[in-house]
Image (cartoon, grey):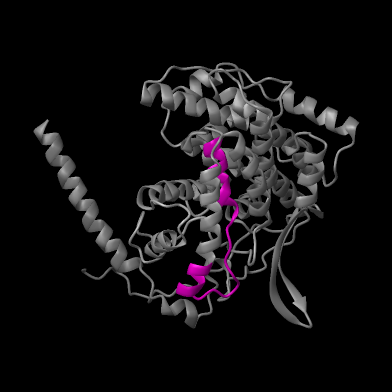
Amino acid sequence: MALKNDNYTRITDEILKLTELSLQNTQIDPSLYAEYDVKRGLRDLNGNGVLTGLTNISEIRSFKNENGVKTPSEGELYYRGYNVYDIVKSIHADDNFGFEKVTYLLLFGKMPTEKEFKSFNEQLNFYRSLPKNFVRDIIMKAPTKNMMNMLERSVLSLYSYDKNADDISLPNVLRQSIQLIAIMPQLSVYGYNAYQHYHKNKSLIIHRPDSSLSTAENILHLLRPDSKFTKTEAKVLDIALMLHAEHGGGNNSTFTTHVVTSSGTDTYSSVAASLGSLKGPRHGGANIKVVEMFNDLKKHVKDWNSEKELSEYLNKLLNKEAFDGAGLIYGMGHAVYSLSDPRCKIMEQFAEGLAKEKKRTKEYKLYLNVAKLAPEIISEKRKIYKGVSPNVDFYSGFIYSMLDLPLELYTPIFAISRISGWSAHRVEEIINCGKIIRPAYKAIMPTREFPFENE
């Protein structure tokens, strides 16, 4: 045993040495990015994305041109030309669940008729069943604490169960996409159940999906041991799914979909790659940080209505003196939106209703107070070129906490929703793909003589 520990220490020390060597020979002088006019993160110096493609799926509007001058405006989000605010308002007014209709709209470019929607729901229900023994053989074996990794593994494993896995003809890709959209809730919740059972010693309860329920209702049905939930809970979750389903072709995970699809690979590999992107805390995991930040705030701010106390804490966040020391107020600002994130404004309204039902109005008021103060404090401390406002992650984490959803499922729920957008963009890339996506990188290392110098 001692020998094994000695070997571990030696190997660890060697890795540390190699890390230093990697840093020494790989780090690039930051000034060179400006010298060669490199658009880091595919953005210019003003944060505008570099135009790399065209899309019919969705559009983000955050600026207006007035007399040739580009000025920040209230944010707007469009799915297939329809303002998402109008979509949510219409569906909510009819007291229906809308995620499935939004999915149809994104995939096929039109709102479904009653007959078309019935047929689409029949397809979703048909594909909600996982392959025989899949839960036992794939999900229950080697459960992981990170549900996004479990999702990636499960999606990739489904390739082995598909006789036409590599067929990228449009009918087959649509069939695969509808199937993945249908079973993503099971993959997510069952993965969490396995983690809770094997890592947390909790009881293992597995519910089958109910064909009479919407996607939002099924998530709550699958997750809760007693399968009980209120109409308000399901409606608010449904709205969150609608708002997260798509967000332009330029977000990291959707761009990943385009990049990977352009290589001609299979649907399962494409979705797994996008899941890997979404897992990153700079993308899909942001609302977890918001919830954790507010938990820390509650420990250090006694009076939640005191602007002075809240401002002091928020300043400490920016000064890297509070929470995780990152110097960020999580849930504030967006790469594209300027004055407002339309998804955030919608979620704020429904968060209020759910907070009343859950008797958490005091906490809701705290979020409102921070939403008011944070932009002002950030503007004082930082150079803001386009304005800063709360983004969708600011309220989504609070909503999920009121729904008693575990933190481990926050990002998978994002994936359950966003796979609708990924699927639409994969179809779009297949139909319009001309070339494999291959951006340019400029080599800056010096040329060296061979044979190798004695280093």
Q: Where is residue 356 in the image (x, y as percent from the top left)?
A: 61, 38
Compared with 31, 304 (above or below) is: above
Residue occupying image coordinates x 39% and y 22%? 198
Q: Nearer the viewer, residue 330 or 184?
A: 330
Q: Where is residue 236 in the image (x, y as percent from the top left)?
A: 66, 38
Q: Residue 163's image quarter?
A: top right
Q: In this view, does 372 lie above or below 173?
A: below
The residue lying toward the viewer, choosing from 314 and 342, is 314
Image: 178 above or below 197: below
Q: Can residue 407 be seen in this view?
A: yes
Q: Does the magenta stretch mainly form a helix, a strand or a loop?
A: helix
**Residue 449 location (% of width, % of height):** 33, 74
- Residues shaded magenta: 376-402
Please identify the quarter of the rendering in which residue 110 is found.
top right
Q: Is 388 left, or right, of 149 in this rendering?
A: right
The quadrant of the picture occupied by the C terminus is bottom left
Asked whether the viewer can see residue 163, the reply is no
Q: In which quarter of the image is the N terminus?
A: top left
Q: From the viewer's perspective, is 23 left or right of 125?
A: left
Instruction: Tell me the residue at 67%/24% (across/down).
Output: 128
Question: Any magenta on residue 385?
Answer: yes
> Is residue 199 within the magenta segment?
no
Number of numbered discs:
0
Picture coordinates of residue 210 (x, y %)? 68, 19
